[in-house]
Amino acid sequence: MTEGVIELCQGRVMHARLRPFIHRFVYRVFCLRLRIDQPQRLLACGSWLFGVQRARPVSFWFADHGACDGSDLYVWIKSKLAQSAMHFELGAVTLQCFPRVFGYVFNPVSFWFIHDKQGVLRALLAEVNNTFGQKHQYLLNAQSLQPIEDEAELECVKVFHVSPFCDVVGRYRFTLSHRAGHQRVSINYHDTPDLPEPLLRTAIVTQSQPFTTRRLISCVLSMPMMTIGVMLRIHIQAFKLWRKGARYHSVPALPEQELTTDKKVEQ
């Protein structure tokens, strides 16, 4: 029932701060990839362990993404594309995110892979949440809406406060790559154009498998507190940075718009 609609992914999140000191960490995660363009098939997926819009030990809820009001996510992403003046015949839309595990989830960043009718990747939306209850979206595309090729670099200005140890300046550079059955999404944060090296390097590397209850049981048993652990690790790493002397930045005002594009659409 879930074939072609949900994939189960296991992998690692990696993070490295390079200035003014080195600070690195890596931890295991599991996540889902869901076909948001097929909401009725998604709603039909479920078992005693997993549910879409149903209370289960592991679950996915529309209200955790998009407009965060429980409305149709496919309608929401189409409205965001319309706001950005991206015009192409929309095909598959896949959302990669953490599910709720025992009722809790925090997604620092979720990725929406947006394809055209021919199955070509045309845009990437990074849906970012911070620990202060705020969210923002970065909508990225290649020049003139060309296909997003493997190893292509997508760039946008940083406008949203995430870490209290980073100012809201500079740019993000996203890179998507596929190697030996693994998908890698890298995000390098460049706080100043004067230095070639980024301030932060972040990546999530995952390997997808067909979604089955048996595989999901294995993930939950090996990482039962995974989603709570995401939030816990954020605060532990923040404490370590503070102890090392990282400068604290207060939470600024939100950007005027909830959607930031990289301004590379040409009509």
Image (cartoon, rainbow, N blue to C red):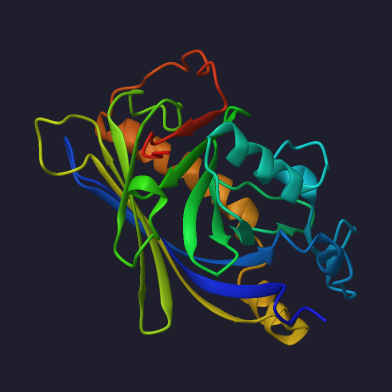
Answer above or below: position of 70 versus 228. Answer: above
What residue sits 61% from the left and 37% below the top? 82
What residue sits 59% from the left and 32% below the top? 83
* Image quadrant where one finds the C terminus: top left
Answer above or below: position of 17 versus 37. Answer: above
Identity of the residue furthest to the top in this view: 253
What residue sits 41% from the left and 37% below the top? 238
Answer above or below: position of 29 versus 198. Answer: below
What residue sits 75% from the left and 45% below the top? 75
Name which quarter of the figure residue 250 lies in. Answer: top left
Left or right of 117 on screen, residue 76: right
**Nearest the eye: 94 or 265:** 265
Name which quarter of the figure residue 176 lies in. Answer: bottom left
Left or right of 104 on screen, residue 200: left
Left or right of 194 on screen, residue 262: right
Q: Residue 131: give x, y in percent of width and height.
A: 56, 33
**Nearest the eye: 97 or 37:** 37
Answer above or below: position of 148 versus 155. Answer: below
Q: Residue 253: give x, y in percent of width and height.
A: 50, 13
Q: Residue 54: give x, y in percent of width and height.
A: 90, 59
